[in-house]
Image (tube, rainbow, N blue to C red):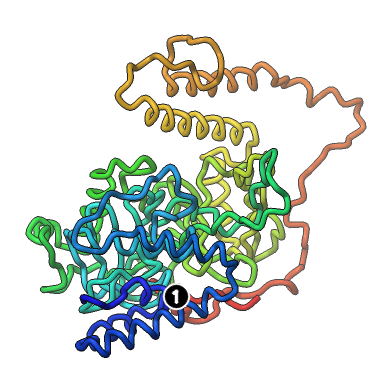
Amino acid sequence: MPGLDLKSLGLAFPSRPDLVAEIKNNADSPARVALFNNISSYICDLASADEPALKRRRVDSADSSVPATNGKANGLPSRQAQPYGSGLGSGSGSGSTAATDILAIAAAETVLLEIKDVSVSIPQRKKFDLAITQNYLYARAANTTTPVPGIVYSWHDIEHVFYLPVPEKAQVQYNYVLLPRGAALASLTAPAKPGAGADPNSTKSTPPPPEPLLFTVPATAPKPGSISGPSAGLAAAVSDSYKALLHWAIEGQLRSVANRYMSSIVSTDTKIFHSATRQPFRPQEKAVHVRAFRGSKDGYLFFLPTGILWAFKKPLLFIPLDRISAVSYTNVLQRTFNVVVEVDVGNGEGEGEEVEFGMIDQEDYGTISETYVRRHGLQDRSMAEQRKAKRELAENARGEKKEEGEGQDGEHAPATGEEDDGLTELQRAEQMLQDAEDEEEEDYDPGSDGDSDGSGSSEEEDDDGEGGGDDEEEDDDDGDDDEGGEAMEADDE
């Protein structure tokens, strides 16, 4: 509405899009517009009272450079210069100014497809309308056109998308989990150390990554009238179910922007993993999850083709296979056991961090250990090094492909710093893996186990070893936990 300062309103009420919408609806006279602008400006001044004057001037200068939302944008922000999620409008990127910029840019794009009344659980637990544009996915309140602050995501920066059945529900429902760049391992505590020459007294810190997007849909088809937008006609052909509709829309947009991280949604697969425990509500179906605690929070582990996901409580954690250094088991008791995953956090120091998932049902020990961990070689550290080398080669290849652009192919030196051997990055990675396997076979000496002088000393790993240690057991049947598609707020620890 002319005269109403939407940027100040967004900064003043970042968590109350409903209030912003009501203000816009009631700003029907010059006097009210002036009153609302004065109130939002006063709240913004209070919020910035503790900031240094230089920082306030810099923010004000950045605000003045944002073009008005007139249906056109002067281009998307540069992805190279963006730290975690600054291009995602998460509100936790490079400050509230950057978030407001993204809100304006996303709102300026034409909404290609809108899906009404979707149950969102993270970042906010509420029903929203999902809007899909050429470059963005965002949520907005019903009967509004403004994106909700903190729920705006760039298609360029989506790193993982999962489609998972909601556990322990009589009615079949599914969760979509979208992880933007940097969010998969964001809940781990090992930060990257400052590089050489960095000022140790600097107060500048790396902004936190954006929150994931988690929303729930039923297994049925969308209700009549819940799909709108210019692409609604095309969507009608794939609207037999929410899965068909959303897979078509999400994967189509990821491909249209040439997303460099992924192009297809990852789903659970009973051939890769399924639990030995029968589900209480749908016993005829194989469960593709196991119940597990992370600290004091109970959740679910999903063993996926690309890694291990713990959900659906904040903070979500996804550990890609190429980040897993090793998997071990602790507290193996009569009814439960714990899984410890050593994660390469990628902080540049070669250090790992251990994540423990506890109170897993003993019935799932064999399926986790045999079906998933051993199949992917997750207990073998040498395999972890090979996965890391392959990941780094893939990252280098992505970077080189982007740098080459329209230049001639074959003009750059190999990423390993060796002389050009005429191999592609993929062929070189396969050769490295084969060489490592050959070295392992050459080093293996089957006669070394029998060289003992009859001392009879053989090292055996501790197995259950608890005898009748039932006193430490707890039943995991804690009743009906209404999580499903609704992620609960983080428990006070």
For image coordinates 39% across by 81% down, the residue present is: 40
Residue at the location (48% across, 62% down)? 95
- Residue closest to the eye, 282 or 115: 115
Note whether 52 is above or below 16 in the view shown. above
Q: At 79% across and 22% down in the image, what residue appears?
A: 448
Q: Residue at x 61, y 47 (%)?
A: 345
Residue 260 found in image quarter: top left
Residue 316 screen position, x and y as percent: 50, 62
Can residue 165 be seen by looking at this rendering? Answer: no
Measuring from the top left, give residue 321's x and y in whole percent. 52, 43
| Along the viewing direction, whichever of 335 and 114 lies nearer the viewer | 114
**Residue type at numbered disc 1:** Glu
Q: In this view, does 167 lie above or below 268?
A: below
Quarter of the image with the C terminus is bottom right
Q: What element carries label 1?
A: loop
Residue 181 appears in the figure: yes
169 displayed left or right of 115: right
Question: Which quadrant holds residue 188?
Answer: bottom right
Left or right: 337 in relation to 150: right
Residue bearing the label numbered 1 = 483
Q: 158 and 146: which one is in front?
A: 146
**Would residue 295 be found to the left or right of residue 84 on screen?**
right
Q: Position of residue 288 (x, y in %)?
A: 43, 58
Is residue 459 or residue 108 the one in the foreground?
108
